[in-house]
């Protein structure tokens, strides 16, 4: 008797084929999921790596642009220093410092020192200008310092600022509030003890000394909060720019924008440069001078600049101001403070910077007072 095993084998194979097919399908799906997940992870890693590389490149380009801006600033300071040595103490609009630089490729400056360096500056552009900061009304003048550490409101300068506000269509009542704000902001500043140096290099105040006994009673561990003097309960921050006017109630952004071309805030009391000041500021500073007379005065200096204060007085008389006494501490023909506006474009990086520079007439040097980057 013979038995055949083929039928059972066929029965077993047919019974296992659906499960094997399901296992193979699940394996294929799992493999596809693993491949897809790996692709997602790899692409994510590559994307993050690309973003990181881009970020590093941007930082490198920005750093290079900042160094170019620093080099341009040093070059500008050299111009101011050299012109201060050769101009005999006169700052006027026709000087070399007043010539703006249009958008120029850096390679045009470096082309004379080699083609290799010129190629490196092919994608870098420079532009900028120098502005006489003493051509504007200095809000620091609203507060006088008759003695080191003493802060008093300057009524003459407050009146001049009132006239400027009226000519610009701004509420003149803000002049006194501005002076009070400036005084309060300087009440705890160390600069209230420093000597004021004029443009000619002479010192106009005594050597700074600390007032108030052995402990220097003007100082306190909590300035403006637990003072024993007449300071306000809250001492405002020291004003460093025209935008600080927004901290004074009554000023609006529109008013500040209107005042910006004619008003500035400098660290010390300064004289107005009559060679560079605008007609609006001159009409405000000179008592009894109209806008038309100020415009005539400004037009007269287009042909010849003023060499000294006597020339200014003669020009004022020619403009219709008969009786005027010029104080060299309030009006001058030279400047110490300058605003340097510079812009550097280096591939994708841009640096737009404004720097306040002080030119010292005594030491024939320049110093950076503050730097502000425009966003």
Image (cartoon, rainbow, N blue to C red):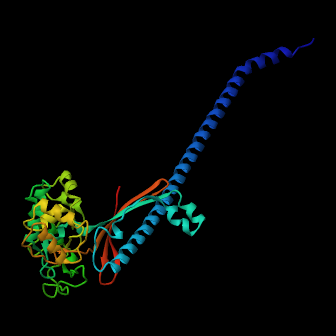
Q: Residue at x 46, y 65 (%)?
A: 68
Location of residue 343 with respect to 6 vertically, above or below: below
Q: Where, by quadrant of the figure, is residue 351 drawn?
A: bottom left
Along the viewing direction, whichever of 204 and 21 lies nearer the viewer? 204
- Quadrant of the snapshot with the C terminus: bottom left
Determine if residue 224 is in view.
no
Q: Where, by quadrant of the figure, is residue 216 drawn?
A: bottom left
Q: Say whether residue 99 is left or right of residue 180.
A: right
Determine if residue 9 is in view.
yes
Q: Residue at x 13, y 72 (%)?
A: 143
Along the viewing direction, whichever of 57 and 174 lies nearer the viewer? 174
Outermost residue on the top side: it is: 1
Q: Say whether residue 52 is left or right of residue 243.
A: right
Q: Say whether residue 37 is left or right of residue 170.
A: right
What is the count of numbered marks?
A: 0
Q: Say whether residue 73 is left or right of residue 270.
A: right
Q: x, y (%) of residue 178?
A: 13, 63
Location of residue 148 with respect to 292 vertically, above or below: below
Q: x, y (%) of residue 65?
A: 46, 61
Along the viewing direction, whichever of 130 and 226 lies nearer the viewer? 130
Outermost residue on the right side: it is: 1
Along the viewing direction, whichever of 5 and 142 lies nearer the viewer? 142
Q: x, y (%) of residue 62?
A: 46, 59
Location of residue 200 with respect to 42 vertically, above or below: below
Q: Where, by quadrant of the figure, is residue 306 drawn?
A: bottom left
Q: x, y (%) of residue 210?
A: 17, 85
- Quadrant of the snapshot with the N terminus: top right
Q: Residue at x 78, y 19 (%)?
A: 13
């Amino acid at each position: 008797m013979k038995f055949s095993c083929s039928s059972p084998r066929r029965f077993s194979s047919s019974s296992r084929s659906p499960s094997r097919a399901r296992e193979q399908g699940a394996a294929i799906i799992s493999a596809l999921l693993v491949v897809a997940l790996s692709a997602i992870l790899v692409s994510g890693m590559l994307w993050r790596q690309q973003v990181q590389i881009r970020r590093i490149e941007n930082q490198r380009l920005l750093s290079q642009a900042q160094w170019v801006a620093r080099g341009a600033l040093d070059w500008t300071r050299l111009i101011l220093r050299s012109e201060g040595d050769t101009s005999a103490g006169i700052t006027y609009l026709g000087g070399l410092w007043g010539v703006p630089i249009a958008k120029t490729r850096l390679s045009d400056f470096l082309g004379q020192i080699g083609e290799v360096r010129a190629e490196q500056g092919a994608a870098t552009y420079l532009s900028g200008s120098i502005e006489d900061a003493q051509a504007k009304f200095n809000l620091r003048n609203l507060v006088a310092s008759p003695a080191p550490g003493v802060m008093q409101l300057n009524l003459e300068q407050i009146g001049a600022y009132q006239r400027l506000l009226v000519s610009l269509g701004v509420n003149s009542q803000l002049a006194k509030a501005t002076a009070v704000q400036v005084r309060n902001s300087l009440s705890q500043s160390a600069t209230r003890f420093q000597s004021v140096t004029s443009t000619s290099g002479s010192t106009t105040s005594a050597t700074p000394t600390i007032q108030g006994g052995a402990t220097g009673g003007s100082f306190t561990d909590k300035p403006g909060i637990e003072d024993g003097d007449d300071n306000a309960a809250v001492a405002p921050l020291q004003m460093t720019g025209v935008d600080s006017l927004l901290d004074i109630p009554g000023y609006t952004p529109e008013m500040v924008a209107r005042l910006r071309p004619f008003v500035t805030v400098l660290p010390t009391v300064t004289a107005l440069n009559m060679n560079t000041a605008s007609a609006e500021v001159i009409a405000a500073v000179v008592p009894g001078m109209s806008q038309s007379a100020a415009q005539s005065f400004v037009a007269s200096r287009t042909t010849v600049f003023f060499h000294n204060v006597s020339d200014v007085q003669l020009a004022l008389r020619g403009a219709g101001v008969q009786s005027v006494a010029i104080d060299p501490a309030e009006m001058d023909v030279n400047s110490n403070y300058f605003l340097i506006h510079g812009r550097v474009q280096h591939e994708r990086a841009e640096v737009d910077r404004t720097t306040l520079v002080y030119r010292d007439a005594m030491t024939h040097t320049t110093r950076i007072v503050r730097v502000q980057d425009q966003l």
